Amino acid sequence: MEKLQPMNNLDYFVELDEMKVLEGGRLSGVYDAANGFRLKFNAGGERNATVQNGIRLHLTSLVEPAPPAQSSFVRLLRDKLDNAIVEKVEQANFDRIVQISFAKKEKFRLVLEQFGKGNLILTDGEGKIIRPMRGEEFSSRKLRVGEKYAAPPSAKLHPRELDGKMLDEISNSGGDKPGIVAILSSKINFPPFYLEEACARAGIGFSAKVAQIEGKKLEQLVSCIKSMAAGEGTSPCVFYSGGQPVAFSAFKMEKFAQYGFERKAFATFSDALDDYYRHGHETRAREEGSQKTCNELSKLAHSIDAQKEAIGKFEGEERENRAAGEWIYENYEKVERALEEARKKGEKNAVIDAEAIS
């Protein structure tokens, strides 16, 4: 698995329906985790949510040990939100933005922006930023302490507002070059991953020109998009190829039928996400471990070569020293006489002329 599949806005819509179980419960812990955080709740029993910045947010049954030391941001969240009641879990603007509202002595909101590198922003009850995980500035908004939080603007249409008339307008504005998926993804807030599925269900090719699609199929396409955007007919699953996960989905995927993937169904979307990301991280860990082993072996090979070179050098010096020692031993009496003569002359550090000795 080269790259983990990130959750899209429709995935968050489906997952947040499952996370509604947290409402009325209390936040009982916040922990740093690999590339993100873990939120622990007491809501009809212990429940955990895993956050991987810019990739995923979902309920999980896979809890890793917390690191001994926590970041300053986590310590702030603990200070402000420990034992706070979860009032509401919601999606903002049908986007990859999750807002969790808390009530303690004061009101707080934790905003999780799951696009790009991801970000977490803690605000007060009025929406004033207490602290962002990472301060950022854009042309339309600032994520800085003291600023009023604002979600990123979007000119795209909500998919549940799509109808035949709007589709005609989109079709007319799309020209003849782009395919249906490219046109719709630029006009409505609906991920291409599921737009392709809606097209497959309506019997429309992904790159089909809008003008070439018959009216009944366009009507069916609109119906499929609106149905999926409402979370109807969900069927959480993970698709495997050769024993490795290749994709997850909140729906059965007709577009995958031609590939012969093995489909594994799950009772909840959270369970499907656990399965996909667990296998994905294990695969990446094996690949990274294999690469690390290769790197270590390469370093070891270089070290062995260096040691061989050093040994060869030492052996050469040893041969030279042995030859010098043997020459001295063979000419011991001559050397001794030369040294005695030098001592008699009172010369210090005398240099012995080997040719004179021989």
Image (spheres, grey):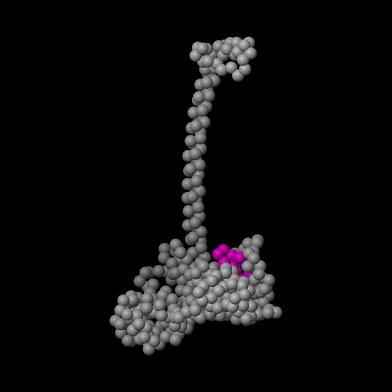
Q: Quadrant of the N terminus?
A: bottom left
Q: Main secondary structure of the magenta part?
A: strand
Tell me: 274 left or right of 223: right
240 or 305, which is in the foreground?
305
At a point 62% along the width and 63% down the height, the residue shown is 65
Can see residue 276?
yes
Task: Say which residue appears at 51% left-offset and 68% top-offset.
Answer: 117
Q: Which residues are magenta?
A: 30-42
**Above or below for 325 versus 75:** above
Q: Is residue 348 above or below residue 200?
A: above
Q: Position of residue 310 (x, y in %)?
A: 51, 35
What residue is drawn where x is 44% and y is 83%?
157
Q: Extreme bottom residue here?
A: 165
Residue ID at (54%, 71%): 137
Q: Where is residue 158 drawn, in percent x and y?
A: 46, 83
Residue 96 locus on image (x, y percent): 51, 75
